[in-house]
């Protein structure tokens, strides 16, 4: 199950409205779009990755319900980044004050905002180079913190805006008080 990139240029360049219409006309397909206008058909995950994604998302939801600091999103949420790329991280979070500053119309569409935090879980069919490029794009577009988790190598790449990428080998937990106050993610369950 590999993602497929469709190059529409030079024939066509989808407008933001046309991208939304393509997504609505094909609800069974998950799309992303690069800043260059390439349409990405995102492959569905396998059972193992889907289960991990659900567990990770649940940890963020429980923390956020307790702290009331922001809003958590699952992988079906598409954000329009400042470079006009349309991306759907596996897990994302936006601070409450930034989210509530958006208009109701923006909230109901693909929000034009970079999350404060994103998490991508590398599945067996994902390209590490593509995932790393996506994480750099997030950081370059205002995402303050990103975690790229690779269950196969048991490594986590940490992306912080304006800093070089850090790598953690087989960490038991992940946290960052600056962006996610009081949140601790136990990643031992992914290292099975």
Image (spheres, grey):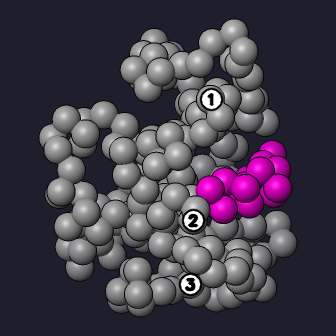
In this view, 29 is above or below 68: above
| Residue 30 x/y as whole percent | 56, 31
Mark found first going from the N terminus, 2 or 3 = 2
Q: Which residue is drawn at 56% across and 84% down?
A: 174
Mark found first going from the N terminus, 1 or 2 = 1
Tag of residue 94: none
Residue annotated with mark 2? 139
Residue annotated with mark 3? 174
Quadrant of the image occupied by residue 10: top right
In this view, 161 is above or below 136: below
Residue annotated with mark 1? 37
- Locate the C terminus by quadrant: bottom right
- Locate the N terminus by quadrant: top right
Q: Which residue is drawn at 63% across and 12% down?
A: 12
Q: Residue at x 35, y 86 (%)?
A: 181
Q: Callout 3: few (<14), some (14-19), or many (20+) C-alpha neighbours within 10 Å?
A: some
Label 2–label 3 contact, CB within 8 A:
no
Query: Mark 2 falls on what kind of element?
Result: helix
The reply, left or right, for residue 165 in relation to residue 24 is right
Q: What stretch is highlighted in magenta?
A: 119-137
In this view, 139 is above or below 159: above
Which residue is nearer to you in this view: 51 or 88?
Answer: 88
| Residue 120 x/y as whole percent | 61, 59
**In this orientation, does residue 114 appear?**
yes
The reply, left or right, for residue 10 in relation to residue 108 is right
Label 1–label 3 contact, CB within 8 A:
no
């Amino acid at each position: 199950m590999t993602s497929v990139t469709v190059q529409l240029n030079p024939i066509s360049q989808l407008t933001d409205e046309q991208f939304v219409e393509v997504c609505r006309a094909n609800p069974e397909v998950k799309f992303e779009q690069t800043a260059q206008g390439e349409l990405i058909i995102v492959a569905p995950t396998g059972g193992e990755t889907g289960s991990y994604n659900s567990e990770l998302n649940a940890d963020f939801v429980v923390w956020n319900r307790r702290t009331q600091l922001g809003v958590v999103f699952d992988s079906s949420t598409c954000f329009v980044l400042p470079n006009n790329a349309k991306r759907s991280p596996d897990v994302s979070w936006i601070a409450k004050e930034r989210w509530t500053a958006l208009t109701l119309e923006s909230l109901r569409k693909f929000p034009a905002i970079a999350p404060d935090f994103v998490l991508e879980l590398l599945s067996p069919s994902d390209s590490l180079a593509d995932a790393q490029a996506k994480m750099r794009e997030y950081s370059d577009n205002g995402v303050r913190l990103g975690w790229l988790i690779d269950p196969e190598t048991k490594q986590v790449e940490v992306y912080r805006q304006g800093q070089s990428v850090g790598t953690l080998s087989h960490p038991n937990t992940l946290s960052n008080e600056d962006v996610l106050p009081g949140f601790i993610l136990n990643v031992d369950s992914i290292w099975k």
